[in-house]
Image (cartoon, rainbow, N blue to C red):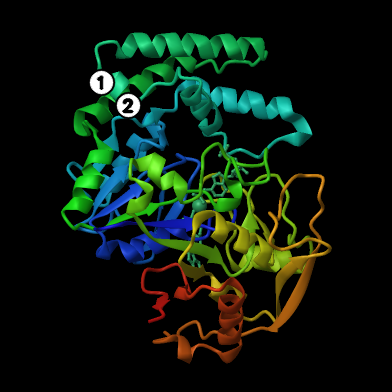
Amino acid sequence: MMEADVLLGLQWGDEGKGKAVDVLAPSYHWIARFQGGPNAGHTLWMDGQKIVLHTIPSGIFREDCMNLIGNGVVIHPPSLLQEIKALRQHGLHLEGKLMISAKTHLILPGHRLLDQAFESAKGDHKIGSTLRGIGPAYTDKYARHGLRYCDLAGPQGNALLETAHEEHLRQLKALDFELPKDLPEQVQAWMDAVYELLRDFAPADGSWLLNQALDQGQRVLAEGAQGSLLDVEFGAYPFVTSSHTTSASACTGLGIAPNRLGTVYGLFKAYCTRVGSGPFPTELHDQTGEALRRAGHEFGATTGRPRRCGWLDLPALAYAIRLSGVSQLIITKADVLSGFEEIKIATHYQGLDNHQSPYPNDSIECIPEYKTFQGWNLEASQSYGSRQQLPTQLQTYLSYLEDQLNLPIRWISLGPERNQILECK
Ligand code: GDP
Ligand code: IMO
Ligand code: MG
């Protein structure tokens, strides 16, 4: 029986999922996003040109690859349309290649405003949301008054939107939120966008499409967004996103049964970054943190915010691997550490059992203990043909991680471009 593979981030997002999916996509027939929405920013580099995908799966540039926005995703029609138009300018024909699940929930104009209103009300305790309306859209979904893509296709579409919008206005008023002057125009633009999308992309039965593809022996890759440590259930709540970011979410977010999941690829950077607020035990507040940010160009792909930087965190990685049943690892940005004299890995937290969740609650302070490794120097222009050709210090670092995490590293990414990656066979 053919199984669907999953690729997800093991940290706080931005591990390089977009690049990795683009590299793996030629061996898959379908790439499917299963959770999150345009809070994601997945970067692809094509011949020196940067493309950031927010809602569209990262298999879109591969000719024979179908791409599905699954039912577990939340979409913002004007942003999605803008993304589609940008891809068309790159010469892509998306009709028949991009599918949108009928059950995908919609981010309404009011959701974005509510996101802002809730964040400002939190003051110093704000989550650092991307303010893309993700939390309020999922709130409405689970409160059972959200709107799905297929709802707008029906004759009641306009009326449903009007009712939902009225309710958002009522909530915003209660929060004393000042409405933007052009809100009516925003709502109109939102409607225009959704009808333009519906014209070109009929609501699809995503679950049926994927299960049928698997039945026919086709290969499916589920593309995670955000990262395991931002999971609404297992991240450091409330400093999380509003969706489930672990592998189980690929089942509910696509309509694939758990016994149809195959390889789970866990992706991590050779160090850690985080955007927004919340615990980050290995964060560096010094020159080294600044050097990591500079070398790794660590600025958000969605909001442009500087990312907080720190050393790799083994207990957190082990936790994320356990939550998702990761079977193969992909490490990215090992090249960013090139030139650092010393490189550290947090091996455990003082006084804590590593087998416990690293962030059970805010009252437990996680103070990391580090192991220090010798740095390496990669030749910028040199292309490495195999893992054995890498500097020995980097090989030592990789072997240590494999030993500690008890999993093989299958891919080593050494730069943002498609060809800057090594497969370990
Ligand atoms: P995603 O959200 O997980 O897809 O990651 P982002 O696109 O938000 O951030 C990852 C950034 O690192 C992007 O700018 C990528 O182009 C870049 N990137 C990905 N892999 C590598 C790598 O191995 N080395 C370097 N230097 N950059 C990488
Ligand atoms: P990709 O897919 C990094 C973070 C935000 C904030 C928290 C909640 O590119 O890895 P939300 O907008 O969901 O209400 O924000 O989650 N966050 C991300 N951080 N990468 C992402 O996606 C993220 N999506 C959300 O910064 O701390
Ligand atoms: Mg990103």
Indicate the quadrant containing the C terminus: top left, top right, bottom left or bottom right. Answer: bottom left
Give the total number of marks visible in the rendering. Answer: 2
Distance Cα–Cα, label 2 vs label 1: 7 Å
* Left or right of 179 in this view: 212: left
Residue 49 seen: no
Relative horizontal placement of residue 399, taking residue 367 as reference (left or right): left
Q: Position of residue 207 (x, y in %)?
A: 28, 40
Mark 1: few/some/many CA within 10 Å (<14, 14-19, 20+): some
| Residue drawn at 57 percent across, 45 percent down | 231
Q: Nearer the viewer, residue 317 or 240?
A: 317
- Name the secondary structure under disc 2: helix
Q: Position of residue 52 (x, y in %)?
A: 42, 51
70 versus 386 height, above or below:
above
Decide which of 299, 143 is in the foreground and name it. Answer: 143
**247 sits left or right of 135 in the view:** left
For label 1, the SS is helix
Question: In the image, what residue occupies the spot 65% across and 63% down?
Answer: 293
Q: Quadrant of residue 49?
A: bottom left
Left or right, 250 with respect to 214, comes to right
Residue 309, position as x, y percentages in the image:
68, 60
Q: What residue sits right under mark 2 in the picture? A: 149
Q: Are marks 2 and 1 in contact (CB under 8 Å)?
A: yes
Seen from the viewer's position, the closer of residues 99 and 355 is 355
Q: Position of residue 21 (x, y in %)?
A: 37, 60
Disc number placed over residue 153 in the picture, else none: 1
Amino acid carrying label 2: it is: Tyr
Q: Which quadrant of the figure has residue 196?
A: top left
